[in-house]
Image (cartoon, grey):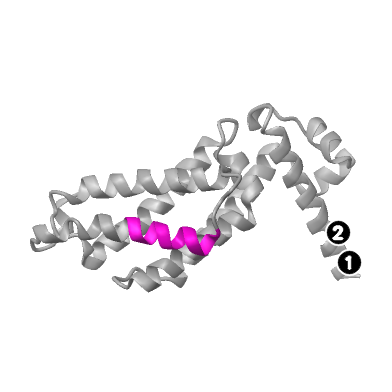
Amino acid sequence: MAERTDRRVRKTKAALRHGLAVLTQKKSIKEITVKELVEEVDINRSTFYLHYTDIYSMVAELESELLEEFKNAIDLYPPTNSEEEMCRFFEHIYNILNDNREICVALVSENGDISFIRQVEDFVAERIKKIFESGMVKNVYDVRYVFDFCISGGMGLFKHWLTDENALEPAHMAKITTDMVVGTLKSFDNNFRVSDYSKIKL
């Protein structure tokens, strides 16, 4: 009985996620009402309120779940100079995005949630900072610029891939991303100086 209830809850929440993604193609998340959402997915308002208090609480739960998956990936793949490990990490991230593609597209679109995008940027920044601290970039004068370049490039790559109708497989994108990041970092290795990250603020 509990399993059947859980399955029903998952099905309802999946329908609501889909409905939210559809509506964000027309208007901002801030403009979407519970009435519009339940009509889009053909469920009762009372059913919606069994799970959420309003649209904002629904979005907050979705974002929290996604960010938790990203953070778990950081813990699972510690920063390393190994390109193979880095590629596995990126593949994990692309798989998370792929599994949640529809709602991720909605959240990062013009009608999405800018605060979520900033949280993802913070996540990317945290990861890249750890890569830098592992010693792959030695020049403390260059590192701030490389850091910003990698963050902007990484976010642009994720957004483009999410909205690409002919998107490449996660494994292939992971290889491309790894090659880009490693290539950028290695291009600064010739300017070797003793790392001293306490002198800079990323």
Measured in 3D between alpha carbons, the distance from the residue under mark 2 to the one under mark 1, in whole angstroms, is 6 Å
Res 81 quadrant in image: bottom left
Q: Amino acid at mark 2?
A: Arg
**Residue 158 in view here:** yes
The reply to whether the C-beta atoms of the residues labelled 2 and 1 are less than 8 Å apart is yes
* Residue 66 painted magenta: no
Residue positioned 90% across, 40% down in the render: 44
For mark 1, does the 10 Å Cα neighbourhood hold few (<14), some (14 to 19), or many (20 or more) residues?
few
- Helix, strand or loop for disc 1: helix
Image: 107 above or below 3: above
- x and y, in percent, of residue 13 in the image: 77, 51
For mark 2, does the 10 Å Cα neighbourhood hold few (<14), some (14 to 19), or many (20 or more) residues?
few
- x and y, in percent, of residue 148 in the image: 29, 45
Q: Amino acid at mark 1?
A: Arg
* Disc number for residue 48: none
* Residue 178 painted magenta: yes
**Front residue of this view, candidates 2 and 173:** 173
Q: How many marks?
A: 2
The main secondary structure of the magenta stretch is helix
Image: 58 above or below 11: above
Stretch in magenta: 169-180
Q: Which residue in the protein does label 2 denote?
A: 8
- x and y, in percent, of residue 169 in the image: 55, 59
Quadrant position of the N terminus in the picture: bottom right
**Front residue of this view, candidates 141 and 150:** 150
Image: 138 above or below 104: below
Q: Which residue in the protein does label 1 denote?
A: 4
- Helix, strand or loop for disc 2: helix
Residue positioned 67% across, 27% down in the render: 27
